[in-house]
Structures are given as C-alpha cells and as structure tokens.
Image (tube, helix red, strand yellow):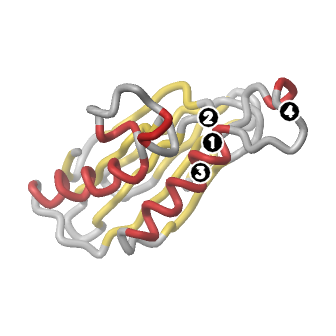
Amino acid sequence: MARGQGVISTIGLGSCVAIAIYDKQTRIGGMAHVLLPSEGLSRDKENRAKFPGSAVPLLLEEMKKLGARGPFTAKIAGGSSMFGTLMPSGGINMGERNVASSRQALSDAGIPLAAQDVGGDYGRSVYFHLDDGRVLVRSLKSGDRAL
C-alpha cells in the first residue's frame, strides 16, 4: 500500500494473479499477488493476501487506513496456463480459476474491473504506478502493455 508516488511491483506471475486497486482521488493504491483461488486449496491459510476472497477486503482495509475513500477501480493481470499441455482434456487450469475468483472478489466488494491482461501461456511482471493508477504489464512473449 502506498500513496501518490512510486511503483508497486510483482515479478514473475504465472498462474497467479496481481490485483491492483486504486483510489484516483487520493492516489492511494494497493496490490496483492494471489496464489490460489480459495483458502480450501491451501494448508496455510494465515496469509490473507494469498486468496482473492480475503485479499481484496485486506487491500481495502489497508488503503482506508492511509486515507483512501473511493470510488475504487481495479486492474488484474496474470492467470496464465503455464503448463497447459500437461492438463487433462477439459480440465480447468489454476490460472483460469485464479482469474475467475479475482473477478468475483472484486464484484463482491463492488469494485469495477477497469482493465485486465489475463490468460495465455506466458509469465508476466506487473508495475503499478501510483501517480496515475497505470499498470504496466511486461512479458517476454507479449512485450509491454499499459492497462
């Protein structure tokens, strides 16, 4: 979580999803790097930021402590199928599940999804610019994309 200046980044997203939430009025933003779509898939449930359903409320709590009031917008990136050829036919991959769960968590919190760069079969790194809410997604396979 931070206000106004600087960049929050997460490097090397595969099936994980970066959820960036921004308050344009106060220029306060936060980002979570979620690993799994639900707590039921993990033995370690202590880190709330690992799961979209608990990460989104956590981000909002922390952003509000810094003075964020909303309205909030969100951008997501990641959710790749890094090993799609190893999946059984018709199986839902972890990247797709993480994206769906992230979208649901944002919807449950009433936060509109302003932009996304999800899916595919390649990794990404995400750079969240707090001065203007821009999210830069970088990948070797797809190049740079601003959200």
Three-letter amino acid code at the position of disc 4: Pro
Q: Residue at x 57, y 45 (%)?
A: 98
Q: Measure the C-alpha gap from mark 4 to mark 2.
A: 17 Å
- Residue 103 position, x and y percent, is 53, 61
Q: In this view, does 7 lie to the left or right of 147?
A: left
Res. 120 image quadrant: top right
Q: Measure the C-alpha gap from mark 1 to mark 3.
A: 6 Å
Q: Residue at x 25, y 51 (%)?
A: 58
Decide which of tag 1 and tag 3 comes sooner along the chain.
Answer: 1
Q: CB atoms at circles 1 and 2 under 8 Å apart? A: yes
| Residue density around tag 1, few if under 14, some if 14–19, many if 20 or more, within 10 Å | many
Q: Looking at the rendering, in which quadrant would you find the C terminus?
A: bottom right
Decide which of tag 3 and tag 4 comes sooner along the chain.
Answer: 4
Residue tagged by mark 2? 15
Three-letter amino acid code at the position of disc 2: Ser
Q: CB atoms at circles 1 and 3 under 8 Å apart? A: yes
Q: Of tags 1 and 4, which is closer to the observer?
A: 4
Q: Of tags 3 and 4, which is closer to the observer?
A: 4
Q: Measure the C-alpha gap from mark 1 to mark 4.
A: 18 Å
Residue tagged by mark 1? 79
Q: Measure the C-alpha gap from mark 3 to mark 4.
A: 20 Å
Q: Is residue 114 above or below residue 38?
A: below
Q: Of tags 4 and 2, which is closer to the observer?
A: 4
Three-letter amino acid code at the position of disc 3: Val
Q: Measure the C-alpha gap from mark 2 to mark 3.
A: 9 Å
Residue tagged by mark 3? 99
Residue tagged by mark 4? 88
